[in-house]
């Protein structure tokens, strides 16, 4: 087997993908976006590895143990890949960003694709290289649980000596308020009543004139949403507007 095989479209469109997620709620939210990208290809989510035609391992590297667990999982998938020569195995997330495609494929030549945490916007392009377009895209959002996460910013611009996040997720990039609200409304329409806003130093959010307090107020204004929380904030970025909202807004 070649160490770096050229991606080839499969002869048939796989029906199910199993996504194995390690790490924080940010990774959980990223896995939801990954699942949505697969659904656009007509590929449904499955929790059963045995029934899956494709597997994604969304990795974490915040601690050595977290990375070691992800690497062990990849090694165990050699048997799955051997039993399904046409199956596709993708490694994504923070450990994928830190280790890099060359190193991972040298260690695990049966991997089909690697996508680091900074490269999530290239996901659809990578899937296009492996899967043909379906006759009709699947639904983008499945029924949500009571609580659903929405990412409002990625990366971090602080340079704490103990933290790997800036090097694997990059500088802080905020998402436009309307895009956030569109995702909130979609998840609320699918059944979510509690929304968790995610970001590193999430309360540093600012897009144009919209501050973090302003964003919280906009999310609270969505009728179906009954509770709003957030993680992970930083003490430096709390301000008077936030505390005024906290005092006056029951959600």
Image: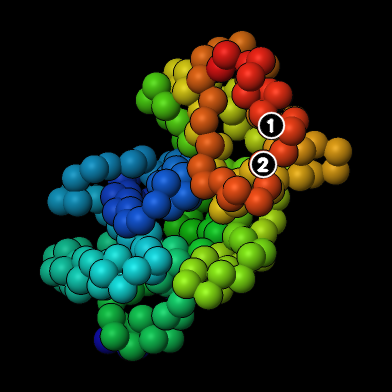
User: In the image shown, does 122 or 116 lie closer to the viewer?
Assistant: 116
Q: Residue furthest right?
A: 209
Q: Quadrant of the C terminus?
A: top right
Q: Tell me which residue sits at (58%, 50%) in the image.
A: 234
Q: Tell me which residue sits at (27%, 42%) in the image.
A: 46
Residue 48 picture location, percent across and down: 19, 45
Disc 1 is placed on an element classified as helix
Asked which quadrant contains residue 43, the reply is: top left
Task: Tell me whether circle 1 and circle 2 mark residues in contact (CB < 8 Å).
Answer: yes
Residue 81 picture location, percent across and down: 21, 68
Q: Quadrant of the N terminus?
A: bottom left
Q: Please, is residue 198 above or below residue 213 in the view?
A: below
User: In the image shown, does 65 or 21 lie closer to the viewer?
Assistant: 65
Residue 119 picture location, percent across and down: 57, 65
Is any part of residue 38 visible from this angle? no
Mark-to-mark CA distance, 1 and 2? 6 Å
Q: Tell me which residue sits at (28%, 62%) in the image.
A: 87
Disc 2 is placed on an element classified as loop
Residue 242 is marked as: 1
Residue 238 is marked as: 2
Residue 90 picture location, percent across and down: 37, 65
Is any part of residue 202 visible from this angle? yes
Within 10 Å of disc 2 (Cα), the crowding (few <14, some 14-19, many 20+) is some
User: In the image shown, does 248 or 120 lie closer to the viewer?
Assistant: 248
């Amino acid at each position: 087997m070649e160490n770096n095989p050229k991606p080839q479209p499969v002869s048939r469109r796989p029906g199910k993908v199993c996504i194995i997620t390690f790490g924080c709620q940010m990774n959980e939210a990223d896995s939801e976006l990954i699942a949505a990208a697969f659904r656009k290809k007509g590929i449904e989510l499955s929790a059963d590895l045995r029934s899956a035609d494709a597997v994604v391992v969304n990795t974490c590297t915040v601690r050595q143990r977290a990375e070691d667990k992800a690497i062990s999982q990849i090694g165990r998938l050699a048997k799955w890949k051997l039993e399904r020569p046409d199956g596709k195995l993708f490694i994504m997330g923070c450990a994928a960003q830190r280790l890099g495609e060359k190193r991972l494929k040298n260690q695990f030549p049966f991997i089909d694709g690697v996508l680091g945490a900074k490269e999530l916007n290239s996901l659809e392009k990578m899937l296009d290289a492996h899967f043909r377009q379906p006759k009709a895209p699947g639904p983008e959002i499945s029924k949500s649980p009571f609580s659903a996460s929405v990412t409002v910013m990625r990366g971090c611009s602080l340079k704490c000596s103990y933290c790997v996040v800036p090097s694997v997720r990059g500088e802080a990039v905020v998402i436009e308020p309307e895009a956030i609200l569109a995702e909130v409304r979609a998840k609320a329409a699918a059944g979510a009543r509690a929304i968790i806003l995610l970001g590193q130093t999430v309360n540093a959010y600012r897009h144009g004139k919209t501050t973090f307090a302003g964003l919280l107020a906009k999310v609270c204004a969505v009728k179906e949403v009954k509770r709003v929380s957030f993680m992970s904030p930083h003490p430096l970025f709390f301000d008077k507007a936030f505390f005024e909202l906290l005092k006056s807004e029951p959600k």
